[in-house]
Amino acid sequence: MANDTVEVPGARLHVERAGDGPPLLLISGGGGDAGAYADVVPLLARTFTVITYDRRGNSRSPFTRPDASITPATQADDAAAVLRHHDLDRAHVFGNSGGAIIALEMVARHPGRLLGAVVHEPPLVQLLPADSAERRELDDIGRLARDGHVMRAYAAFGAMTLPDPPRIFLSPAGQAVIAAGTHLMLAAGDLARKITRREPDVMTRQLRNAELTLRRELPAFCFDFQPDLAALAAATAPWCLATGRDSVGKPYHTPSQVLSRRLGVPCQEFPGGHVPFMQHPDDFAKTLTTILEGFAA
């Protein structure tokens, strides 16, 4: 695997590349870290040139300006910049969750860059009624973060992504216990790394991204952003929506179905829930490869 950096307006992106074959860009969701796809990159790299990256402001992709934009449009431009950096005219794109919203913006803004796009479970609750349960759930998480309870909010956020979360994740008291334990773990990890000089692991990096994820990205992606339905309907690149078999009732399942019906775009099904590339890496890689090969048929 080769690592590189890509300069974009307001940020410096950490990029990883593996394999040989048709290019495939994987865009991560909340936490914005290439490590989310670590289990499936070796599988997909048997067929594709797989490119992953830490999204702007997350993990190893620091902002170079404190006021740098994080909008989906800006991040779709980042993804296009990563492709340009690798001299790729076009690529397949898979985006999950918040990364799916970025993939959707690529369909609208950069269709000429796409061999095909899979938009997996974008949490577009702004397409749902204002009093919908899905919107209320995300708003409650955002309110916790805005009130300064970021790690409690992150526990609730984590529970939302699991088909059957442990009970401790579901109550305010349980979330408070998890938050306290997380703060202690991060402090102990920081001390250990000062001694060992080891780089933080994926989970530590994502926990460090929690404030950006919940206080800035969540409102920007799930409440302020409006997809360009006309541009999506007119897009020339092949693309589809996708959901997980175990995601029914989650805030990212219904919006995918709504958008599929509204635009007449197919909605494919993946095994597992919101993060099938972590839960079922082999089945995920097979399903994604089948969908991408279908675009070329």
Image (cartoon, rainbow, N blue to C red):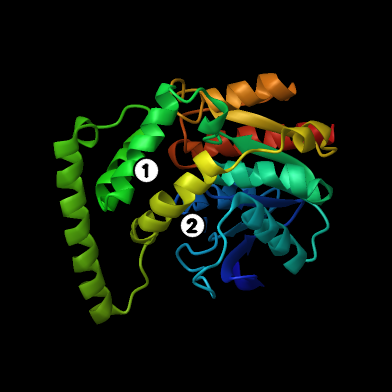
Residue at 43 percent of width and 22 percent of height: 131
Q: Is residue 5 left or right of residue 107?
A: left
| Figure check: 273 above or below 199 | above
Label 1 crowding class (10 Å Cα cut-off): few <14, some 14-19, many 20+?
many
Of badges 2 and 1, the one in the foreground is: 1
Residue at 34 percent of width and 74 percent of height: 198
Q: Is residue 158 visible?
A: no
**CB atoms of marks 2 and 1 within 8 Å:** no
Secondary structure under tag 1 reads helix
Q: Earlier in the sequence, mark 2 or mark 1?
A: 2
User: Which residue is identified by label 1?
Assistant: 142
Q: CA distance from mark 2 to mark 1?
A: 20 Å
Q: Position of residue 170 (x, y in %)?
A: 24, 32
Q: Where's the C terminus, which quadrant?
A: top right
Residue at 84 percent of width and 49 percent of height: 112
Q: Quadrant of residue 175?
A: top left
Amino acid marked by disc 1: Gly
- In the image shown, does 135 or 295 lie closer to the viewer? 135
Q: Position of residue 244 (x, y in %)?
A: 52, 27
Amino acid marked by disc 2: Asp
Mark sitting on residue 33: 2
